[in-house]
Every structure is written in C-alpha cells, then in structure tokens.
Image (tube, rainbow, N blue to C red):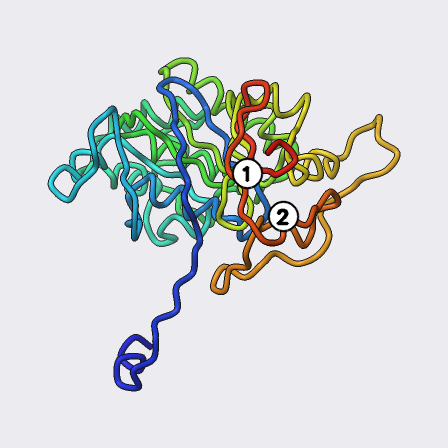
C-alpha cells in the first residue's frame, strides 16, 4: 500500500491513535487505562512497552529518556501480558519452553519458581502444550512468562477479559498479591470500570486517542468529572441501580479528526464551544479533566 501511495503520489493517511498524551506511572503503583474499544489503550501499552515507536513525543524510564541506544536495556525491565492468552503463546511449544523463552535459555529452576508464583505446579504442566490447559491456566502461563525476567514494569492489556467471572477474580487477586510482594509497577489496561476500581491506584480515562480524565482512582470513582467518565461508571451493573446508562452515538474518525472536543457528538452536556474549540486540562479537586465544563 505504501508503494502504491508513492507511485500514484497519494498523500499518506495518518491515524491519530494517541494524541498529546502525558501520563506518569509511579513506581510501585498500578495505573489503570480505561476506555471503550478504539480509544487508544492498547496502542499506549505497546508504546510504553517499546513494542511500537511513537511518531512524536518522548518516553522516559526511571528518569532516563528511551532511545535506540538504550532500548535493549530498557526492554529487560519491562514485560507485557496480552489480552488473549491463547494467541499470545506458541501452540506447539511445551509450557517449560514458553515460560523460559524470554530468558533466551532454559532454566528449570527459574521456570519452576515463577510457575509456583502464579499457582501452577512445574512437574504437572512442564511438558504440556497450551491446548491441554484451561483459559485461566494459560493466562497464568502468560503472566509467568512476563515475570520470569523480573521486570520493574508490567503492562497488562485486558488480562482477564477473555476469562469467566470466577477466573477473572482469581487472576486479579493473583496480580495484586504479586504486585505487593515484589513492589512491581503495573500499567493495567481495561474497558471495565469495576475492574479498574478494584485493582488500580490511579486511572487515566481515554477516549478517541485522548486522556479525558486522570487522577486517583477513588476520587474519579466517587465523583467523576468528565461526562464520558460519568457514563462509563453509570454503565457498570450494580444491585443498587435500577437503570444503566452508557454513551450513545459513534466514536469520531481518528483519520479526519473533527474540531473541538472529541466527545462533543455524544456528550449529554455539550455546549457550542465544545464543537469548535478543543478544551485544555483543568485541575478539579486533584483530578485533571479535559472538559469545557470546567473551563
């Protein structure tokens, strides 16, 4: 496609999957990245994990800017767990090979240790293939694989969305226990506000490539400021709720980005200025909000 664009002198098409985002993941904490599908969550995770390179902007790890020169060193300190446990592992490899692969060599002692950490018995699973394990077990394998090189930062991309509710709870508790035990730092990507409330310290709410609300989880959950965040929380089922609400309408194009606030066409509190001028962040009760309601 790029060759055809050059031959026919067509202008390249750019998708603004992420736009003007500035966040900080504090050491030893869990930052949640929440939003609907297509909001830029996974792209953010891949950029922070250095799987993808941003077209603009800078990344810092422990105060050091990430460049091509130190990229290999930085990658030794980060790992990522992907959304679908079955598609993130090689189906033909034995479990012992899968878990030890990030080390570049087979180390049975380390494999046994990390499998024990995620609640699996080395002797029982070492020679099995992924198809012989359940979804919950494979997700534990994916987590063990990410942990074996002892990373400082773990990026978790919807690590429980493909699992049953009871298994989700087990995996979330497991992740919390590991994080506290080893003082790890997590970037936890999810579309579920309930999960974010349970596991995170801070939350970055994303919409159409933008972070629209950012701050401590308890403040955002107790008193959401942005209309999009309010609707996301209102859409979470609860025994006390008689009616659920969720955003209606279509997400704007990330190729031909409309002027003004990107949530304007779906916002129940939209004003004229929202349709023409992009808002700036405002600090409201210790939470950063990208909305003209506080302008």
Task: Using residue 51 as the reference point, say whether residue 64 is left or right of it.
Answer: left
Determine the residue positioned at 70% across, 46% down.
271
Q: Is residue 53 above or below residue 126?
A: below
Asked if one can make out residue 281 in the rendered structure from this viewpoint, the answer is yes
2 and 1 marks in contact (CB < 8 Å)? no
Find numbered disc 1 in the image and state the secondary structure of the residue it sits on. strand
Split into 4 quadrants, where in the image is the N terminus?
Answer: bottom left
Find numbered disc 2 in the image and state the secondary structure of the residue it sits on. helix
Task: Using residue 136 as the reference point, say whether residue 228 is left or right of it.
Answer: right
Determine the residue positioned at 88% across, 34% down.
242
Disc 1 crowd rating (10 Å Cα; few below 14, some 14-19, many 20+) is many
**Can you give x and y, in whole percent of width and height, for residue 89 in the image?**
38, 48
Numbered marks: total: 2
Foreground mark, 2 or 1, reads 2
Q: Which mark is residue 274?
A: 2
Residue furthest right in the image: 242
Determine the residue positioned at 39% across, 53% down.
91
Asked if one can make out residue 132 in the rendered structure from this viewpoint, the answer is no
Alpha carbons under labels 2 and 1: distance apart: 13 Å
Residue furthest left in the image: 69
What residue is pinned by disc 1?
212
Determine the residue positioned at 41% across, 48% down.
43
Q: Earlier in the sequence, mark 2 or mark 1?
A: 1
């Amino acid at each position: 496609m790029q060759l055809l664009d050059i031959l026919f002198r067509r202008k390249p098409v750019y998708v603004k999957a992420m736009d003007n985002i500035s966040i900080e993941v504090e050491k030893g904490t869990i930052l949640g990245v929440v939003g609907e599908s297509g909001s830029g969550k996974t792209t953010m995770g891949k950029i922070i994990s250095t799987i993808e390179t941003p077209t603009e902007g800078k990344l810092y790890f422990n105060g050091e800017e990430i460049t091509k020169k130190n990229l290999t060193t930085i990658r030794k300190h980060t790992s990522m767990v992907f959304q679908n446990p079955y598609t993130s592992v090689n189906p033909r490899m034995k479990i012992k090979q899968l878990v030890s692969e990030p080390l570049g060599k087979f180390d049975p002692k380390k494999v046994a240790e990390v499998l024990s950490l995620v609640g699996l018995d080395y002797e029982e699973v070492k020679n099995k293939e992924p198809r012989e394990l359940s979804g919950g077990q494979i997700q534990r394998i994916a987590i063990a694989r990410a942990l074996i090189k002892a990373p400082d930062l773990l990026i978790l991309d919807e690590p429980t969305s493909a699992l049953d509710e009871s298994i989700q709870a087990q995996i979330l508790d497991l992740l919390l226990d590991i994080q506290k035990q080893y003082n790890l730092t997590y970037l936890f990507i999810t579309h579920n506000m309930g999960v974010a409330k349970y596991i995170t310290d801070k939350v970055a709410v994303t919409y159409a490539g933008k972070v629209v609300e950012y701050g401590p989880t308890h403040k955002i959950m107790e008193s959401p400021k942005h209309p999009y965040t309010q609707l996301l929380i209102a859409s979470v089922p609860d025994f006390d709720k008689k009616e659920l609400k969720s955003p209606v309408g279509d997400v704007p194009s990330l190729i031909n980005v409309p002027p003004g606030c990107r949530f304007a066409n779906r916002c129940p509190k939209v004003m004229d200025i929202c349709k023409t001028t992009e808002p700036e962040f405002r600090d409201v009760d210790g939470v950063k909000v990208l909305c003209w309601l506080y302008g």
